[in-house]
Amino acid sequence: MAVVADGRRILSSIVASQMAEHARYGGVVPEIASRRHVEQINLVLQTALRDAGVGFRDMDAVAVTNRPGLLGALLVGVSAAKALAMALSLPLVGVHHIEAHLYANFITHADAAFPAVALVVSGGHTDLFHLKNHGDYVLLGRTRDDAAGEAFDKCARLMGLDYPGGPAIEAAAKSGNPSAVPLPRAWLDGTPDFSFSGLKTAVRRVVQSADPPPVADIAASFQEAVVDVLVTKTVAAARQAGAPPRVLLAGGVAANARLREKMQAACDEAGLPLLYPPPALCTDNAAMIAATGYFHLQAGRGSDDLSLDIIASEPLAVRAHVPNPGGS
Amino acid sequence: MTNNLYSGDDGVTLTAESPEETRAVAARVAALLRAGDVLCLYGDLGAGKTTFVQGLAAALESRASVTSPTFTLVHEYRDGRLPLFHFDVYRLSGPSALADLGFDEYLAAGGVVVIEWADRIAAALPKERLDIMLEEEEAGAAGDEAAVRRRVTLDGREARWFGLRAAWEREVC
């Protein structure tokens, strides 16, 4: 939970971290997630307000993630947000989780603006968007199987590294040779789509081979394969989208230093300004939800009422309609 | 991967030479599906479980692009002939973690529930289900994904799945 002023000033941001418990199981445990949500939500609300030095009456609006996600967890947040909005007569904004990742860039960069091409890369998503304006987005490409962050997690597990796999592989890769192990890169005939399933299978074969190379070399080579594809396709999409003035990077994998470094180099070469949030705002956080609510209201996109629903699956944007040359 | 759900005598085993053939097997299964069905997928990382669900969704006339729900745990595809609820329980600690996913609600929601890594929640699985085991056969050249063959074994108790088996056995012979 977070208190954010004017969309850009984070007064407080509380993460009721469950990472230690999840790490014990090597993954997220929804029962823990949802039960903890109920137990902690009032305490977290009080802490967020206290740390921000504000009271209930100082708030101008309430924003909450209502899609997509685990229904049990979404329900706890949306119910609390509705109670706050009703009791305080405040506008309520239901926020799409992926849109909030994009707006994390607006918190720290005063020059963040539309239009842009954005790569959202996390455990659950690998999406390329053309952002035309607030709320006006077109899907350019997405993963056809595994998300990049998922590939990091699964390959870390194959290599015997810790959860979460992103930081573990990044750390192991530091002492490895990124070209030591030949691993496939799925270019998919130059489309803006991604595929990391074959890479995962290839890493499994390397790990399970009779004489596997050092883990550091597998980690570095794997990371390089993922980063190469992400960087090449993002820059290609940005060029193809008609010279957008900037590239945005968002989502948990955007915290990866190698991805930032290579994306920066490629964008520099292409003459494209690149923006990405600081690592704490790349991973899931509440400040980005609050900021999205602010920009949503500022852009005149309206507010929700108490009928605001929770939605398990919903894409942020769809692909552009391609006119049928047959004309039917 | 071994799984005690399989006696070796049960079920019908097919070979898929490519991801397209894995999707085609799924399409044959999809033709028999009705509301309330539960499909359980078993197999190692990279065995083709998500590929199978892609074939299922397409055959159910969903236009959605199906991706792995490992992180998000459940994806809903409601635009097809039947709603398809795609679970991945790879990261769950066990059957008791299912409650917050709304698992029972999904079972009763009038759609088809398909579960990747179903062996992780074996105790919570309904008896009426179709088990689908995906296995990679002896790998060819490393990295040559196109050359990898997969064994798909289907095993279900209900009469209509036996029909599926009979149809396949006729084709294979």
Image (spheres, coloured by chain):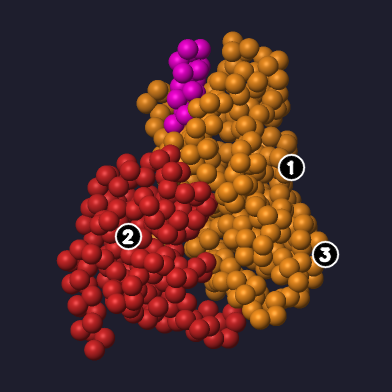
Chain colours: A orange, B red
Screen quadrant of the C terminus of chain B: bottom left
> Which residue is identified by label 1?
A278
Which residue is located at x 47 percent, y 81 percent?
Answer: B137
Q: Could you confirm whether marks 1 and 3 are on the same chain?
A: yes
The part of the chain drawn in magenta is: A75-91
- Is residue A72 placed above or below A121 in the rendered structure? above
Q: Give the secondary structure at mark 3.
A: loop
C-alpha span from label 1 to label 3: 24 Å
Which residue is located at x 53 percent, y 83 percent?
Answer: B139
Q: Is residue B48 left or right of residue B34?
A: right
- Is residue B30 placed above or below B74 in the rendered structure? below
Residue B14 in percent (x, y) is at: 34, 79
What's the amino acid at mark 1? Pro
Whether residue A219 is visible to the viewer of this picture, yes or no, is yes
Label 1 chain ID: A
| Residue B39's disc number | 2
Q: Residues within 10 Å of mark 3 (few under 14, many from 20)?
A: few
What's the amino acid at mark 3? Ser
Classified by dominant secondary structure, the portion drawn in magenta counts as: helix
Q: Mark 2–mark 3 contact, CB under 8 Å?
A: no
Residue A187 in percent (x, y) is at: 59, 71
Q: Is residue B8 left or right of residue B173?
A: right
> Which residue is identified by label 3?
A175
Front-most of residues A93 and A123: A123
C-alpha span from label 2 to label 1: 42 Å
Front-most of residues A61 and B89: B89
Q: Give the secondary structure at mark 2.
A: strand
Q: Is residue B58 magenta?
A: no
- Is residue B70 placed above or below A80 in the rendered structure? below
Residue B136 in percent (x, y) is at: 47, 77
Q: Is residue A79 magenta?
A: yes
